[in-house]
Amino acid sequence: MPLTRRTRTTTLFSAFSVFALFAVSACGDGAQSAASGEAIESAPPELRLDGVCPDTVVLQTDWEPEAEHGPLYNLLGPGYRIDSDQKRVTGPLVIDGQDTGVEVEVRAGGAAIGYQSVASQMYVDESITLGTVTTDGAITAAADQPVTAVMALMRKSPIMLMWDPETHPDWETIADIGETDEKVVYVAGNTYASMLVADGLIQESQLDASYDGSPSRFVSDPGIAQQGFATAEPYVYEHEVGAWNKPVEYQLLADVGYTVYPQALSARTGALEELSPCLERLVPVLQRSAADFAADPGPAVDLISELVTEYNTGWVYSQETGAFAAEEMVDLGILANEADGSIGGFDMERVERIRQDFTPLVTESGATVPDDLTAEDLATNQFIDPTIGME
């Protein structure tokens, strides 16, 4: 099974105090709205999306609002409207301060879609233009709910294994963990666990699939290794988990073989041809937004904090964590250009290696993978503008 984001459960933070977040005044029918009336100029013709894209471009995320989705929230212009019942935010789709002529709606995942996979949600609700699907999830869905990635939202996964450096001063890598008998605590159903065993980095006897997102196990038993996100837990454990309040060490799984493209923006494969005129314009706009977010994440992080408060799902994500995440994404190369200097594209040789490496693991988990599945089924650079990248 693909990596689940249910690891970021509310219990991870709810037992500990966090910083106050923003709030806005209520509108009718459970909706909230930002202050409107701020004038924005019209985008030049090459950035206009009206006439080729849906009046509302719908983007389905895989989890609650967080900085990993920052390039998507960065698209929302003045006058956006927050629907706290449906857990979605809608407003003018703006790039470089210019109105593209359509609206964008960014929808929360996780509890808001009943913890379904994004691929399955896209087939339930065909109003979704693009959804965030990790490559191993696309392999899992390929038989019944095929999706094709059109832009990489991140270049590599932020998921990690972390440990206490005081308890294990000799641990420097995940391979060091595998030389011991300490448990590796993770959420059941994650492809990377099988990968670590298959690659000889972790012993199968070390795997403990009992992680529920709470820090209590790690705090009470610092001998274990535990899954987490390099964009959150290092900050949260040091600054927001009162029972810990010290650094952790970690290694990214991306550095030991979990080479998937995380949360890649994907379309239903059968809808690609119909969506192509839109995607020719939309994907470069998304690339620009990713580069802009990397350079100046503050406005999107502010909006994410506002949404966390207004959605009120029990998910707690402080503004400080969002700011830390945005910085770490760039510092760790999670949000980064490809080798050709462009942002959002795919290394198709890497996609093929992912297909070869993860198809057996997905099959072993019980999923059916088409025998004729190709890298080109999983991702395409057809709509990527190679001239757009981070500076």
Image: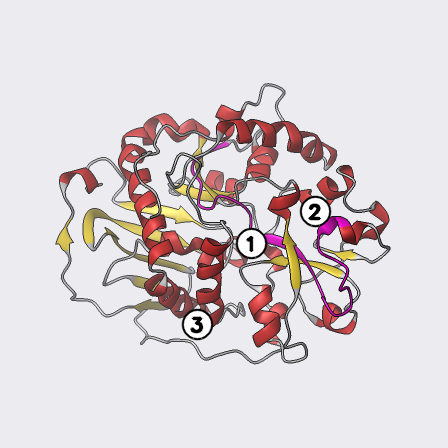
Front-lying residue, 107 or 164: 164
Q: How many discs mark residues in the rendered view? A: 3
Q: Is residue 368 visible?
A: no
Q: What is the distance, in whole Å, between disc 1 and disc 2 at their CAs? A: 17 Å
What amino acid type should be assigned to the residue bearing mark 2? Gly
Residue 211 is left or right of residue 50, and the answer is: right
Quarter of the image holding residue 216? bottom right
Quarter of the image holding residue 77? bottom left
Task: Verify whether residue 12 appears in magenta.
Answer: no
Q: Is residue 88 visible?
A: yes
Q: Earlier in the sequence, mark 2 or mark 3?
A: 2
Badge 1 crowding class, 10 Å Cα cut-off, few under 14, some 14 to 19, many 20 or more, is: few
Front-lying residue, 323 or 331: 331
The residue wearing badge 1 is: 114
The residue wearing badge 2 is: 189
Q: From what the image shows, is residue 285 above or below residue 353?
A: below
The segment highlighted magenta reads 147-175
Residue drawn at x 36%, y 68% as measured from the top left: 302
Q: From what the image shows, is residue 337 above or below residue 216?
A: above
Which quadrant of the rendered structure holds the N terminus?
top right
Question: Residue 309: which disc?
Answer: 3
Badge 3 crowding class, 10 Å Cα cut-off, few under 14, some 14 to 19, many 20 or more, is: many
Quarter of the image holding residue 215? bottom right
